[in-house]
Image: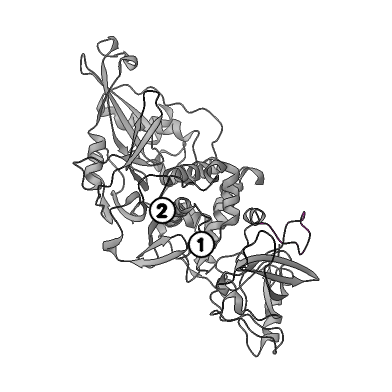
């Protein structure tokens, strides 16, 4: 496909002829002069191509009358796309239709929704030496220069209009020391709302501002970890392309048509009708799809192992359970979000004997809200202090100490290891069910919960950790409304390069003060652990205990 876009770093297209009018950044689509000629780099041909951009009032059936058809014509072929007349010029994109469509045929809204999302390609500013610069640009194409850096190299800053993105050396193993770059507007780009997708936009913005996670995709390191073919990695590729648009395109707002099309293929029921969805569902499905496609250990059966013993042996038994877990789970999602463990302690109420079981970290830590909770710390202690008695049908089969059969027991859960990225969800919605187990009413808990921008989590676990448990708040999802499937979702995220927080209300992005980051409507929190200057980040593998969060030796593999 051939794509044309006005780059935000440029003030105008470069006219091929001096009498051709230029297109300034202050114009809307209504003001684009007909016959504007431009040059843009084409990824398909690998050359600078000439284009004629014209505008026509849109009278196509099924398209709103206040839209304009933007036509790009090259090689005698026309490519069309519809946009609102009020859209700013830097958001104008024209793309080639798929092969099964006739050229010049207008797309329906559904066809446009499922069309391939365009790349954002740079164009050059006008100058009196345009002919000389055009020659130079063509000499830098893949066809004319052998052995040079690839055009997709993010560090080719003059061509792509990008600036270096410096990452802490702590992340070298995750990123392979690959170069990174971003546009001047990177990380401050909004996402359009397709009617009822604010829940998805809010989660996507928070995930995008988990710096090492996004850097993993922008550096193309994810390509080295994929073992499946193209048909089995569509979601990962679409997500990586979305990150490039958000961080490297330089536009104010992204129209994620391709990503929405892929989401519709994977979990389309969330997009049916006009009903709002719960942001927690969006988080789960995105999280799960990325982990499944990136998982290098997708086959095999997980074995948790025998975990009986006294508390002094918990670290070793937890490490053994972790080794079995890594045998079937290996991905960047695992490394960043799931490198943690929960400990369940089951106590026999006859002899008070306790055994421990270690479970993998969940995708998010769901914390309760009660009349006694005012802060995130309060919510955590409310969760950790909760004792769950075994119901009559769930009695402990046999106590290893007193050998009692079907004895009464109780269960309590706490944190054993904490992951580098901590996702916390507040249980803001209380469901009321009837005798059949059907939900008949959902009530929102509106109690405000305070959260620190820097959270010391060392008080949340008694287990020894290799690194300090100091976390910084990088994202918050707010819910406005009375039920999870109504109202509106917005997010507030930390821009790592500037240290400033921005609120993302779909396509609108505004800077907020630190005092306004956490509001009474906070629903999700994304915390990232501080980089340790002495202990580098290690990717998790079952054969390298030194990378595990546990304090064990290599000999544990033979035990």
Q: Residue at x 36, y 36 (%)?
A: 441
Where disc 1 sits, the SS reads helix
Q: Which residues are magenta?
A: 98-108
What residue is disc 1 on? 246
Can you give x and y, in whole percent of width and height, for residue 108 in the image? 67, 57
In what quadrant of the picture does the C terminus appear? top left
- Determine if the magenta segment contains residue 107: yes
Where disc 2 sits, the SS reads strand
Q: Is 230 placed left or right of 295 in the picture?
A: right
Q: Residue at x 48, y 69 (%)?
A: 164
Vertical order, 427 against 165 (above or below): above
In what quadrant of the picture does the N terminus appear? bottom right
- Given residues 246 and 346, the one toward you in this image is 246
What residue is disc 2 on? 488
Mark 1, other Cα within 10 Å: few <14 / some 14–19 / many ≥20: many
Q: Earlier in the sequence, mark 1 or mark 2?
A: 1
- In 3D space, how far apart are the residues under numbered discs 1 and 2 (Cα atoms)? 22 Å
Q: Residue at x 46, y 47 (%)?
A: 276
Mark 2, other Cα within 10 Å: few <14 / some 14–19 / many ≥20: many
Q: Is 14 placed left or right of 273 in the picture?
A: right
Q: Tell me if I can see residue 226 in this picture.
A: no
- Given residues 146 and 377, the one toward you in this image is 377
Can you give x and y, in whole percent of width and height, for residue 166 in the image? 44, 65
Can you give x and y, in whole percent of width and height, for residue 419 in the image? 36, 44
């Amino acid at each position: 496909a051939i794509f044309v876009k006005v780059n935000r770093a440029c003030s105008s297209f470069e006219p091929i002829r001096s009498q051709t009018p230029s297109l300034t950044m202050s114009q809307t689509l209504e003001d684009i002069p007909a016959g504007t000629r431009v040059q843009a780099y084409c990824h398909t041909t690998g050359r600078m191509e000439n284009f004629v951009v014209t505008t026509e009032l849109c009278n196509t059936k099924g398209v709103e009358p206040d839209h304009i058809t933007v036509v790009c014509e090259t090689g005698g072929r026309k490519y069309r796309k519809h946009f609102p007349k009020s859209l700013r010029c830097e958001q104008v994109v024209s793309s080639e239709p798929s092969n099964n469509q006739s050229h010049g045929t207008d797309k329906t809204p559904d066809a446009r929704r499922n069309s391939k999302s365009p790349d954002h390609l740079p164009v050059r500013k006008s100058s009196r030496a345009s002919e000389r610069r055009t020659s130079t640009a063509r000499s830098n194409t893949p066809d004319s220069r052998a052995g040079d850096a690839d055009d997709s190299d993010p560090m080719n800053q003059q061509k792509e209009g990008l600036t270096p993105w410096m990452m802490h050396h702590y992340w070298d193993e995750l990123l392979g020391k690959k170069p990174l770059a971003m546009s001047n507007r990177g990380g401050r780009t909004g996402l359009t709302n397709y009617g009822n997708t604010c829940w998805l936009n809010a989660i996507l913005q928070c995930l995008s501002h988990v710096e090492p996670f996004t850097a993993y995709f922008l550096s193309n390191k994810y390509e080295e970890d994929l073992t499946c073919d193209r048909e089995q990695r569509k979601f990962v590729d679409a997500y990586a392309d979305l990150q490039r648009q958000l961080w490297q395109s330089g536009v104010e707002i992204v129209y994620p048509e391709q990503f929405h099309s892929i989401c519709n293929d994977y979990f389309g029921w969330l997009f049916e009708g006009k009903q709002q969805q719960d942001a927690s569902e969006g988080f789960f499905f995105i999280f799960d799809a990325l982990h499944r496609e990136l998982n290098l250990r997708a086959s095999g059966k997980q074995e948790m192992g025998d975990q009986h013993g006294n508390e002094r042996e918990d670290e070793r038994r937890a490490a053994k359970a972790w080794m079995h877990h890594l045998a079937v789970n290996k991905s960047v999602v695992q490394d960043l979000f799931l490198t943690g463990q929960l400990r369940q302690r089951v106590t026999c109420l006859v002899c008070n004997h306790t055994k421990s079981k270690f479970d993998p970290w969940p995708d998010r830590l769901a914390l309760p809200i009660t009349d006694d909770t005012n802060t995130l710390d309060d919510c955590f202690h409310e969760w950790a202090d909760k004792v769950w008695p075994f119901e009559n049908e769930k009695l402990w089969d046999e106590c290893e100490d007193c050998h009692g059969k079907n004895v009464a027991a109780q269960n309590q859960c706490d944190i054993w290891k904490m992951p580098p990225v901590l996702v916390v969800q507040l249980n803001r919605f209380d469901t009321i069910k009837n005798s059949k187990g059907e939900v008949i009413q959902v009530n929102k808990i509106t109690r405000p919960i305070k959260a620190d921008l820097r959270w010391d989590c060392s008080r949340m676990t008694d287990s020894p950790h290799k690194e300090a448990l100091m976390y910084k708040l990088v994202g918050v999802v707010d819910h406005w409304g009375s039920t999870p499937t109504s109202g509106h979702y917005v997010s507030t995220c930390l821009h790592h390069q500037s240290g400033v927080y921005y609120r993302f209300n779909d396509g609108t992005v505004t800077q907020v003060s630190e005092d306004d980051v956490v509001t009474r409507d906070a629903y999700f929190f994304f915390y990232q652990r501080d980089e340790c200057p002495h202990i580098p980040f290690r990717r998790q593998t079952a054969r390298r205990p030194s990378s595990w969060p546990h304090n064990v030796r290599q000999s544990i593999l033979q035990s």
